[in-house]
Image (spheres, helix red, strand yellow):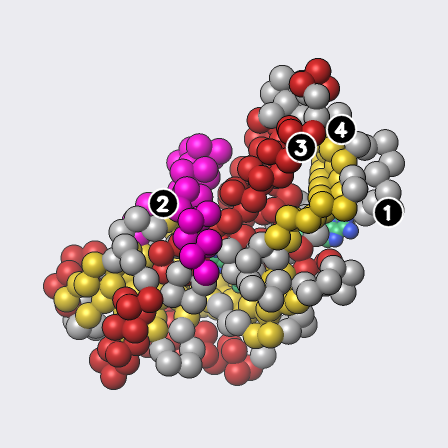
Amino acid sequence: MRVLIKGAGVAGLTVALELTRHGIDVDVVERAAAVATGASGLAGGMLAPWCERESADETVLTLGKTAADWWEEALPGQVIRNGTLVVAAGRDTGELTRFAGRTSGCDWLDGAGIEALEPALGGRFKKALFFREEAQLDPRKALAGLHRVLLERGVTFHFGCEVEDGTGSFDRIIDCTGAAAIGATPQLRGVRGEMLFLETAEISLSRPVRLLHPRIPLYIAPRGDNRFMVGATMIESDDAGPISARSLMELLNVAYALHPAFGEARVVEMGVGVRPAYPDNLPRLTVDRDVISVNGFYRHGFLLAPAMAGQVATILTETIPNRERHCA
Ligand SMILES: Cc1cc2nc3c(=O)[nH]c(=O)nc-3n(C[C@H](O)[C@H](O)[C@H](O)COP(=O)(O)OP(=O)(O)OC[C@H]3O[C@@H](n4cnc5c(N)ncnc54)[C@H](O)[C@@H]3O)c2cc1C
């Protein structure tokens, strides 16, 4: 049994790992020259199912709870489990109450509690929510790590090419092409996400911090080496063109509102990714003869891909006789 995975984003690489764990031979074809060039390379890397429940279905919490463990097992040392801090300006304290009412798994903090967790934010916010079970990873490092692990497991990568329709010499195709499938996949749409990286040694944070705002809730995720990812807009569009001036101002405003030290930070990167999404904003696995598609990860690719990859492995192992598998 040979399986070809199309797409080396988080969906494709997590499926590849799950299949190799079941002894299935895997090739990966990626039209770009490297892994993580799509939406996956621009993600915040937050593994935050409790926070996401604020606007997401219960399924996201159910499937996402074990994501941090999956990533830690796959890539030991890459998952940072420091929780998520959610703050709001004094005039927006009602947003915190609303957020707490729609989520679970958090504690209220006062100013001293905030300062104990994030000394840099001392005196800046009076109240916060702390989701202690949440985690984060660096998406680019994580996908580079998965690439390495997969090579060690004998997976063959074909970069810079696409495959025609049909399975060719493969028994199954797993389509993990993300937003590239918009138009060809019924109901799949794009949700544009703009982000940027700031670099400054003037401030340090130990965990992602979400700043609630009635119109523009955004976050800052520390990445080490004095880098901070600021994200991300949510715009109903599959336009992957350059960041707009308005979005750039909003992202910079949130950083400045969190701490004025970000005013002197260097803007070292700006990026735009298109999140693939179905109408219910939940991922879907669809089977059409020998092609299985895994798509629609919306803003939860790193959070939900491990669970969906497990489902793909289950489907394949239930249909493949044992003698056709190889030991991983
Ligand atoms: C700004 C931003 C922040 C985000 N933050 C988070 C977060 O904090 N946590 C989280 O869990 N999720 C987050 N997400 C969501 C997450 O990034 C996406 O859900 C996820 O990346 C989708 O992964 P994918 O593998 O389906 O698509 P992609 O990452 O886009 O991968 C698809 C791959 O398929 C390749 N491809 C396309 N067509 C073909 C073809 N015909 N043949 C071969 N290869 C092909 C593409 O080149 C690409 O590499 C964020 C997204 C954005 C944009």
Q: Amino acid at mark 4?
A: Arg
Which comes before the other along the chain, label 3 or label 2? Answer: 2
Q: Quadrant of ligand 1?
A: bottom right
Q: Quadrant of the N terminus?
A: top right
Q: Say which of marks 4 and 3 sits in front.
A: 3
Question: What residue is shown at x 28% (from left), y 66% (from top)?
Answer: 100
The answer to whether residue 199 of the structure is visible from this angle is no
Q: Which mark is residue 80?
A: 2
Q: Which mark is residue 165?
A: 1
Q: CA distance from mark 4 to mark 2?
A: 35 Å
Q: Residue furthest left?
A: 112
Q: Say which of marks 3 and 1 sits in front.
A: 3
Q: Say which of marks 4 and 2 sits in front.
A: 4
Looking at the picture, tell me which residue is in the foreground, 177 or 227: 177
Question: What residue is shown at x 84% (from left), y 38% (from top)?
Answer: 167
Q: Say which of marks 2 and 1 sits in front.
A: 1
Please state if 37 lies on the left or on the right of 213 as rendered.
Answer: right
Residue 75 among magenta residues: yes
Category of crowding for the residue at label 4, using alpha-carbon neighbours closer than 10 angstroms: few (below 14), some (14–19), many (at least 20): some
Q: Which mark is residue 2?
A: 4
Q: CA distance from mark 1 to mark 4?
A: 16 Å
* Above/below status of 327 relative to 117: above
Q: Are marks 3 and 2 in contact (CB under 8 Å)?
A: no
Kindly indicate the quadrant of the structure image that contains residue 297: bottom right
From which residue to which does the magenta span run? 57-83
Question: What residue is shown at x 44% (from left), y 43% (from top)?
Answer: 67
Q: Which residue does the numbered mark 3 point to in the structure image?
A: 316
Q: Position of residue 15 (x, y in %)?
A: 61, 39
